[in-house]
Amino acid sequence: MVLQQFMIPNPLALIAEITHRCPLHCVYCSNPLEMAAVSEELSTEEWADVFQQSGKLGMLHAHFTGGEPLARADLTELIASARAAGLYTNLITSGIGLSETRLQALVDVGLDHIQVSFQDSREDAANWIAGAKAHAHKIELSRLIRRHKIAFTVNLVVHRQNIDHLEEIIAFIEQLAPERIEIAHTQYYGWALKNRGALLPTRAQLERATEAVTAAEKRLAGRIRVDFVVPDYYARFPKACMGGWGRRLMLINPAGKVLPCHAAEVIPGLAFENVREKTIEYIWRDSASFQRFRGEEWMPEPCRSCDQRTQDFGGCRCQALLLAGDAAATDPACSLAPAHYIVEAALAEVNSNAAVSQPVPASSIVQLQKLAESLWSYRTNPE
Amino acid sequence: MAHPEDSSHPRLAAGCRWGAENKPGSEERVVLFPEGAIKLQGTGRQVLERCDGQRTFAEIIAELQAQFGEADPAKIRADISQFLEQLRHKRIVDY
């Protein structure tokens, strides 16, 4: 027991998924299809207690995400309590619901970093992907953010429908003057997996996009930092999902369930503890769910004898479950995985039918959802 | 502008700050930034603690050259310049 405690490093950061409510309906959303109900959400005091525990456990960052964190009326209090617990606070947001006064209040209580998502540089395409009229407000908000001395990141999720004009999008983001641009290929979980057929880029698209990112990195060096999240479907080895299961990160969902990653609830047979019943230190060190895929004991071949295992930790458990039907399998994104044929089949399909769609003009979200029905499903909202 | 100039005022970039001193008296301190943290001790810590937006690059160099009297002043300057340039690329330092 003592030895085990000694050997498990403390988590570095807390991902606080404070609500699953969201005014946007992005087709690439990685939230679970089964969302936590509003009535189950943790209270202001319960979150404050979680942040205190997190600070004491040695965590450094609290990433506020959702859903849309601004959908919680008590967000300012939540940020304040995380700061009071010694945590670096990062707000990951669409910006919808953020007025000038609310932003000022967040900065006043010590918000360190704001990360605003953009869907595209073109308004019609951006609103089409988000399933909401959000683009113009985000531009307005970016100007307000630049008046404050907090870190500003613009996040862009790329996929087949926007990847062909990535250079234009980067130039657009550059004008918003963030410190950092995060260009992330879509990760296929939740709604994104449901909509994968319309989102997965072709190999030719990916190659051009990678060149565009490399050129931007060079051009913007010293001014804007460019972080790039690679698409694991096209990689040789899987991503080191969450930096390894129960190794660096802890996620708490709106209802207080503690998860090793966003999608972990899809894994059958795993029971996740709740902060309403257990301390996060206990959950991190001793709970069955966090121990299940920690370390190398659980690994099958080819992971067990692979040199890459200390780099990618066998890839993503949720992806193994979602694609191969077995959470303990090697991530099918790995070129060495027995189930890699599943990823190859998805790639073969997308590369033989590389159609890019055009934004659908619609006056309301209901109409938009009807018009786009054959292409994809928009993310819905919790009860 | 790649390297800091003598008249530059190096400082932590927006949204970057020192973490709390969890272990008082410890050699090690942490600078927090979006998505990460760096642990600093020794010379690195001494350089960054002087990047307060008040001191110029020339003043920071002079203070550290005085402190490390026996080391080659040109090497101290080159090392610190490179250190700050790297941190600027990560958007942790501005100058």
Image (cartoon, coloured by chain):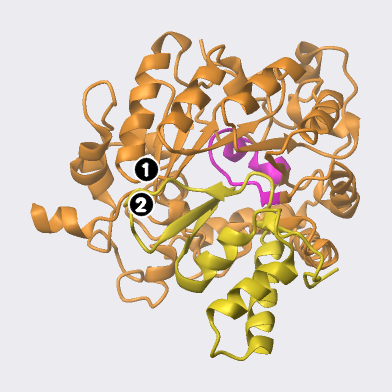
Chain colours: A orange, B yellow
Packing grade of label 2 (10 A; few <14, some 14-19, many >=20) is many
Q: Are marks 1 and 2 in contact (CB under 8 Å)?
A: yes
Examine the rendered structure and indicate whether residue A304 appears above or below residue A182: below
Which chain's residue wears label 2? A
Marks 1/2: CA distance? 6 Å
Magenta region: A182-199
Examine the rendered structure and indicate whether residue A291 appears above or below residue A280: below
Q: Residue A59, located in which quarter of the rendered image? A: top left
Instruction: Check residue A193 for magenta coloring.
Output: yes
* Closer to the camera in the image, A173 or B43: B43
Residue at which label 2 appears: A245
Residue depicted at x 48% and y 32%: A83
Q: Number of numbered discs present?
A: 2
Examine the rendered structure and indicate whether residue B38 appears above or below residue A45: below
* Closer to the camera in the image, A140 or A88: A88
SS of the residue under disc 2: loop
Specify the amino acid type for callout 2: Trp
Residue at which label 1 appears: A260
Q: Position of residue A188 (x, y in %)?
A: 57, 44
SS of the residue under disc 1: loop
Relative to A254, A94 lies left or right: right
